[in-house]
Structures are given as C-alpha cells and as structure tokens.
C-alpha cells in the first residue's frame, strides 16, 4: 500500500501523529534556552597580566610589547590586539575557525615562557579562552540604601503637616534627586532626618565586602559562569618610607623591601609521625596587622636594632582605584554577571533577581546598603522576541486571508491552514533536538517561512479539488490527486532546501550567526512537505463537501462574493495597465517613488 493511501485510510493515526508532534513541540518550546542571538564560537585566547600601580605606557613597554613579540608566531593565529590600562595589560588573540584550542593554549603558554623577563612586581600572566558568552547579561550597582517612594509615603502619613512638603521628593524621577530634595527639606524640618541615608558610609571602601558576599553569592546561581566587581578600593598595608631617616641609618629601599619580603611568608617545615598521628609543621610569618610590620627588625647589631617604624610610617589604607563607578553623582561599586555557554538567560536572570532580593533583605540592609539592577539583557530579549512573534502572527493572518480570498471557501482554507501551526510547532521540536536555542535569528527564520509553509499544501489541495469536480469517490480523489503532484512538491521543497542548507557548512562567524535561520526555514519547509502529503489529503477526504448539482438553487456565501469581486478588480486593474505603455511607465514610477519615500521614512 502506498504511504499516501495508508494515511488517507487511517485518519486516526494521522491525527495522533499531529497531536504528538504538537505536544512535544510545545514542550520543546518551553524547554529551549532563550537568548538574544545564537552562540558564536570565535576561537579566542586572552592573556592578562597585572602590574599594580603601573601606568598604561609602562604596561605597554615592559609587558605587552614583549608578549606580542613572542606570540605573533603562534600557529593558527589570525588576529592579535592588545589593550594597556592602569595596572593591567591584555593581549587578545583570535585563531582560525577549527583550531584545536587545547593545543593553542599549550602553544601560547610555551611562547609566553620565552619572554625575557617581567617587572619585579608584576604578576604571572593569566591565560584564558573567551567567547560570546563573556558578555555581561546583568549589571548591578551597590550604593547606600535610598528611601523609596513607599518610605516617603509612610512619613507623609505619620507627619500630615509635612505631606505637601515631602511630595516633590516622593515624585522625583530617580533616587538621587529624591535624596537631594530630602536634604533640602531636612534643613528646615529635622524630624525627617531618619529618611536620609547615613553620611558615614564610604561606598568605595566596600569593594572587599562586595567580593566576599555579593560576587560569591551571584556565582553560586546556576548558569552564572563568573561575576566581576568594578570600582571601589582594595585595602592595602602601606609602608611610607622617609628617605632621610633611611639614609641616616645607611640603609636603602632595596634593603627594606628584601627584609619585608623575606619575612612576609608562610613556610612549610615538613611533617613527622608520633605513633599513629601525623603532625604537619609550618611557620606562619605573614603580617597580620600594621603593628607587626612596624615592629619588624631591619638590622640588629652591637649598636642596637633598627625597626621599620624608625624609618617609615606603617598604616592600613586603600589602594588607588583602578576604575571609577558613579551614579547620581556619587561613587558606587558595580557588579556584573556572565552566563555559562548554553544557559537559559531567562532562568539565570530569575535566579539573579532572587539573590538580589535575599541580599537586600539580609546583610546589605544591616550595613545600610542596597543592590540595584541597572541592566537586564532579558528586557531586550523579550522585546525582540515579542516583536518577531508578533510578525509571525501577522504573517499567518495575512496568509490565511489571502488563501481565503483566492480559494473562496472556508473549508479548503482551514485544511491548508493546518500546515502553518503544525510545521511551526514541529520546527521547535527539531531545533531543540539539534541543540539550538530560541533567539531572534531562529524566530526570524520562522517568520520568513510562514508564507512558504502553505505552498505545498495549496498545490496538493488544488489538485484534489480539481479531481473532486469529476464526481469521483472521495478517498480515491484524495489519494490519486496527491500521488500525481507529490513528485513536483518534493522537487520544489528540495530547491528551497538547496538554498539554505549550505549555510550549515559555513564555519565562520557569519555561518554560525545565520545557522539558526537556515535550520529553522529548512525544518519548517521540510515539515510542510510532510504535512502536505499526509495531513492535507487525509483532511480533504473527510472535510470536503460534494458540490451541489448544477440545477439546484444555492445561495453564494459572502466570502465567495467578496472573493469574486476582488479577483474581478485585480483583472480589471491588470487590463487597464496593459492597454498603454505610458500607463505602465506611470505605475512603475509611482511604485519606485513610494518605495523610496518609505525607505527614507523608516531610516533611523
């Protein structure tokens, strides 16, 4: 039995198949990771080297140029760029697509070992692979706890006589403006001072606090690869040397540095066994507070001992900031989060919001701080995907409308329309099986394919309807008519696939970017072919009504009357412009001018 005939004779199996595809397609839709754009894997290695306190010029001269001289000969290197800033130098290397990055890491490490020497205070270079997922999906600002509109409203209820005075502060567009207005009001009405944030909090000094509590909490969220802290100052133990006192004691800066460096270490002294117990011996020599440094002996001889405090002032201070973050005119600390490759951005963002609420209600509230999210990538994702979804809906409605006008009947239109949702939902199942994500590119492919999804179904249905007019048996008509055109339908589908499938073979960035659109269109069109030779004949065999005999009276439906008038108008319009060359030129001119005006109108 021919497969088409088997489908027509077993409508229950076909219906169950459609329901299964729809069910698993919807499940796949909600399980697919949602992103703004597809993952673009660019083979990239970055080398970061820290030299605390060094200027960008010193970083470039002593570190970056030396590294570039050695790395430029790495095999497979396509592009190399560098960036020098205060205390840090970065060399970024892009490799040819298809390069084995494990071997590339080994080669880069080997070439870096050939650098003659690094400055004495510079850290060891850090080698890491990076890709598109390194882009931050969320940014947060750590600042003083600001009064909210609800807090001001509570004060208005407690102090009715100040309600009108507090109203401008409550209506302020941002917290910074609200605090500014509250400070002015507090000068005349000290009773509202409780609303103002504490003035003894220096946010930049909370960098270590942000690293210990906020950064670590974000990194525990599933799907977050790393979190970074920007702004603020790290604590440091500062030894400010007096050159005159040092020279008077016949000492140099090098002597002082070597003495402190040799003492500020923890050393392992091995281990020994006592019975069944194993004891590990280590000396703890690292300085714990400024007093230990000040009391350290530099020189001891018969004339006495020279301490660090004799030649320098030791105090606990903060490092010079490497980056500045300001919001509403005040210094703050910024924290960002990067997702893991393939993670669902919406789910990751939900966990980050939950962590933010927990921090604000707990340790941050106790310290008079608050964490505010200032960037959320999901806003752009939802807006972009919502726009594409709307375009898909509009395209589907327009497709059905055009079909209804030209098919002039509701039943054939409904039969053809089955190809649209079945193919789209089935495409989600295939894309999920291929490990793709739900993004603007893949949805754009579905939007492009909406009009093509009904092509095969229209060809099959039109041939079925033509045979139907001959009064042949319904089942025989559905099978024979479909078998007549299935070869042409397959050939038409293969030509479409031949256009888009070669994109899969392109491994460069452009190929990775447009891979989803090629897969979406190919899967949707392929499914529409399957629907046209299985679902369409099966539905036609049971939903088509035998036309009335020519002698019977019938009332023409409103849809058919409108379709007839529309087709007649199109034919009249066509004949009118076929009657004169100048009319055709005028039509083309108007069309071109209108197109240009439209393009200019929609330009950003």
Image (tube, helix red, strand yellow):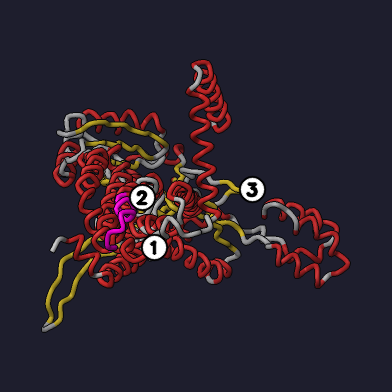
Q: Is residue 591 visible?
A: yes
Residue range corresponding to the magenta coloring? 463-474
Image depth: mark 1 or mark 3 in front: 1
Instruction: Give the tally of numbered discs.
Output: 3
Q: Are marks 1 and 2 in contact (CB under 8 Å)?
A: no
> Rounded to the nearest whole Å, what is the CA distance between mark 1 and mark 2?
21 Å
> Rounded to the nearest whole Å, what is the CA distance between mark 3 and mark 2?
55 Å
Image depth: mark 3 or mark 2 in front: 2
Closer to the camera in the image, 36 or 547 = 547
Q: Which mark is residue 454?
A: 2
Q: Which quarter of the rendered picture does the C terminus lie within?
A: top right
> Where is residue 284 shown, x and y percent of the image?
29, 64
> Where is residue 583 shown, x and y percent of the image?
53, 19
Q: Quadrant of residue 112?
A: top left
Please give the residue where the numbered disc 1 appears in the rendered image.
Answer: 545
Q: Which mark is residue 328?
A: 3
């Amino acid at each position: 039995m021919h497969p088409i005939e088997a489908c027509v004779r077993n409508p229950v199996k076909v219906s169950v198949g459609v329901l299964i595809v729809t069910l698993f397609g919807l499940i796949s839709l909600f399980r697919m990771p949602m992103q703004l754009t597809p993952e673009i894997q660019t083979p990239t290695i970055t080398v970061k080297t820290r030299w605390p306190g060094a200027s960008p010029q010193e970083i470039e001269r002593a570190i970056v140029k030396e590294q570039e001289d050695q790395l430029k000969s790495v095999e497979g290197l396509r592009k190399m760029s560098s960036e020098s800033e205060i205390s840090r130098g970065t060399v970024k290397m892009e490799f040819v697509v298809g390069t084995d990055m494990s071997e590339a890491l080994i080669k880069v490490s080997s070439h870096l070992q050939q650098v003659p020497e690094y400055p004495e205070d510079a850290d060891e270079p850090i080698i890491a692979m990076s890709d598109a997922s390194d882009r931050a999906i969320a940014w947060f600002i750590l600042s003083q706890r600001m009064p909210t509109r609800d807090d001001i409203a509570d004060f208005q209820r407690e102090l009715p006589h100040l309600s009108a005075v507090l109203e401008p502060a409550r209506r302020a567009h941002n917290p910074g403006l609200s605090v500014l207005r509250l400070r002015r009001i507090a000068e005349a009405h000290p009773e509202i001072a409780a609303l103002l944030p504490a003035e003894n909090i220096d946010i930049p000094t909370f960098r270590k606090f942000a690293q210990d509590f906020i950064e670590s909490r974000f990194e525990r969220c599933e799907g977050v690869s790393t979190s970074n802290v920007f702004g603020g100052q790290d604590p440091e133990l500062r030894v400010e040397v007096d050159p005159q006192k040092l020279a008077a004691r016949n000492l140099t800066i090098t002597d002082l540095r070597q003495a402190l460096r040799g003492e500020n270490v923890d050393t392992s002294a091995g281990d020994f066994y006592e019975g069944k117990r194993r004891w590990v011996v280590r000396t703890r020599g690292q300085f714990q507070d400024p007093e230990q440094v000040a009391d350290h002996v530099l020189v001891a001889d018969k004339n006495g001992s020279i301490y660090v405090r004799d030649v320098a002032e030791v105090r606990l201070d903060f490092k010079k900031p490497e980056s500045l973050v300001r919001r509403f005119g005040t210094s703050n600390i910024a924290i960002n989060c990067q997702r893991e490759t393939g993670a669902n951005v919406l789910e990751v963002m939900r966990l980050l919001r939950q962590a933010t609420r927990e921090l604000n209600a707990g340790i941050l509230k106790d310290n008079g701080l608050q964490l505010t999210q200032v960037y959320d990538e999901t806003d752009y994702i939802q807006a972009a995907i919502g726009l594409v979804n709307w375009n898909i809906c509009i395209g589907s409605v327009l497709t059905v409308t055009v079909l209804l006008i030209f098919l002039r009947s509701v039943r054939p239109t409904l039969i053809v329309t089955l190809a649209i949702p079945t193919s789209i939902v089935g495409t989600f199942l295939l894309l999920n099986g291929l490990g793709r994500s739900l993004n603007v590119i893949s949805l754009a492919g579905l939007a492009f394919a909406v009009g093509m999804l009904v092509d095969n179904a229209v060809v099959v249905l039109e041939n079925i309807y033509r045979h139907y007019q001959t009064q042949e048996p319904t089942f025989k008509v559905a099978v024979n008519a479909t078998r007549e055109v299935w070869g042409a339908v397959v050939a038409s589908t293969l030509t479409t696939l031949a256009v888009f499938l070669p994109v899969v073979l392109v491994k460069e960035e452009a190929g990775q970017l447009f891979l989803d659109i090629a897969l979406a269109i190919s899967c949707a069109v392929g499914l529409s072919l399957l629907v046209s030779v299985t679902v369409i004949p099966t539905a036609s065999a049971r939903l088509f009504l035998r036309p009335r005999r020519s002698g019977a009276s019938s009332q023409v439906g409103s849809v058919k009357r409108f379709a007839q008038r529309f087709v007649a108008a199109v034919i009249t319009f066509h004949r009118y412009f076929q009657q004169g060359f100048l009319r055709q030129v005028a039509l083309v001119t108007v069309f071109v001018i209108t197109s240009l005006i439209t393009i200019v109108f929609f330009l950003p």
